[in-house]
Image (cartoon, rainbow, N blue to C red):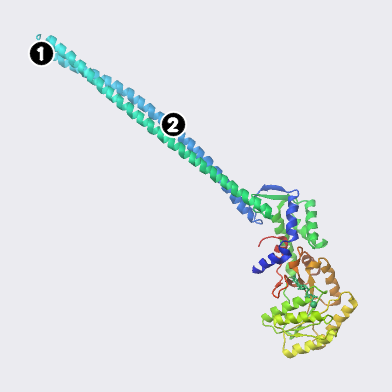
Amino acid sequence: MAFFKKLKDRLFKSSSKIEEGLDAIVEDGGVEEEAQFDAQAGTDAAEAAQKAAAEQAKRDKLEADAAAAAEAAAQAEAARQAEAAAAALRRQEEVDRAEAARQVAEDEAARAAAAAQAQADADALAAAEAARVAAERAAAEAEAAEAARQAEVAARAEADRQAAEQEAARKAAEDAAAQREAERVEAAAAQEAAKPGLLGRLLGRGDKKTVVRRELDDDMLEQLEELLISADMGVDTALRVTANMAEGRFGKRLSTAEIKGLLADEVTRIMEPVARPMPLYPTKPQVVLVVGVNGSGKTTTIGKLASQFQAAGKKVVIAAGDTFRAAAVEQLQVWGARAGVPVLTAPEGSDPASLAFDAMEQAARDGADLLMIDTAGRLQNRADLMEELSKIVRVIRKKDADAPHNTLLVLDATTGQNALSQVKTFQELADVTGLVMTKLDGTAKGGVLVALADKFGLPIHAIGVGEQIDDLAPFDPEDFAAALMGTDR
Ligand SMILES: Nc1nc2c(ncn2[C@@H]2O[C@H](COP(=O)(O)OP(=O)(O)O)[C@@H](O)[C@H]2O)c(=O)[nH]1
Ligand SMILES: [Mg+2]
């Protein structure tokens, strides 16, 4: 994972040409859709969650509104019923009270009449008068009691009405607060959902509420082919990759993230069989001949490899076989010193084959595990170069009939499709057993490595991602495909 981070940061100058081009292709004729969760574009899950939150807030608000309305209706109904009950009670009490007064008056009158009867005639008038007075007083008393009761009922009703009013006001205030909160939540959710959309667009990533999808048709397929070709994948490989990716998907709508994932899968499938580290044999010394055009990175790669093998406990010897330039020898000596590995040199312009022979003897004497032989890469005169390489091979075979055990062809990723013709040429000059591709940090393309794997099937041992001693990495197809397509890992 640490390496992937480095690869992602360094490879293709941090952003591959393919990654940038894909967005443009999908947006050309693509339609913005509500983001739906899909396993390929993990970011869509966040979008869906945001959308769900906004919808939930909306639902919650509707529910709160409905509840508030129901509450208000229930309250009004309760108030109405209470009022009706109070009125009925008042009416009944009035009736009861009148009846009671009448009864009292009657009783009183009867008693007065009886008294009058008993006292005979004498008091008859007085008694009748007294009875009248008593009846009048009773009626007045009853009337006063009724007035007091009525006043009390009225006061109670007024108090109830005021309490109901206060409760209604409190409830209304509560409802308003609930409504404001619901609106705030909804607005926040909407804002939250809108924010990453804008950012997502700027970054060209999928973190948006909507996702652009384009229906896969011939036009789009052609654009994808062109994009892959422009990233040095070569026509044949680009056609194969896009055709495989499109199989069974015509007419389907695809997002950039989905296309990246599908293309990365295709690239991984092509690269997996060739991703193999340089094989190590028990033979001592194992002879590694390093070939490639001038400037491809042979000397640098030898330095990096020697350092790695040395660190892994192998005893390494280097032969500075590029005797054509004095600077090349000095450069290798610097690398040898960095890696802590002895470097055998010969005078400028001397025969590299005789240096190789001496190096075989010394490596055997030292009990070295590995002898790495640097070579010149002057392709200007192919016949000379071929003669030089075959002479080296002839000479070292006098010491070991199976040598060289590995012939590494070093290729420069920034030369693009040219790397394909270099493989053809060097396969004619030498028996190439594996590839190292350098300078993948120096290009935004890198598709040529896919084309190489697809066309030649030669093992890819390592990739160079910088000029420092630890800038040589084993080749990991999944990491490479992810970095090439811009998918996240
Ligand atoms: N950025 C980058 N530069 C590299 C890489 N490998 C080699 N170089 C540079 O490429 C140039 C040529 O490398 P050299 O090893 O001399 O190539 P040679 O002529 O094949 O031996 C040098 O300046 C190296 O520093 C790499 O992986 N990344
Ligand atoms: Mg060199």
Quarter location, residue 394: bottom right
| x, y percent for residue 217 | 77, 51
Foreground pick, 441 / 476: 441
- The disc placed on residue 76 is 2
Identify whether 116 is placed above or below 242: above
Identify whether 47 is placed above or below 345: above
* Residue 411 in sight from this viewpoint: yes
| x, y percent for residue 150 | 30, 24
C-alpha span from label 1 to label 2 = 63 Å
- Foreground mark, 1 or 2? 2
Foreground pick, 171 / 395: 171
Query: Which tag, 1 or 2, sits closer to the chain's start?
Result: 2
Would you say the beta carbon of the disc 1 residue lies within 8 angstroms of ligand 1? no
- Kind of residue indicated by mark 2: Ala
Q: Write down which quadrant ligand 2 falls in.
A: bottom right
Quadrant where the N terminus lies?
A: bottom right
In the picture of the structure, the residue carrying the numbered disc 1 is: 118
Judge from the rendering whether residue 117 lies leftward or rightward of residue 199; answer left or right: left
- Kind of residue indicated by mark 1: Ala
Quadrant where the C terminus lies?
A: bottom right
Which residue extends farthest bottom?
365
Judge from the rendering whether residue 213 lies leftward or rightward of residue 233; answer left or right: left
Foreground pick, 242 / 147: 147
The crowd level at tag 1 (other Cα within 10 Å; few <14, some 14-19, many 20+) is few
Residue appearing at x 66%, y 69% in the figure: 3
Judge from the rendering whether residue 238 lies leftward or rightward of residue 56; answer left or right: right
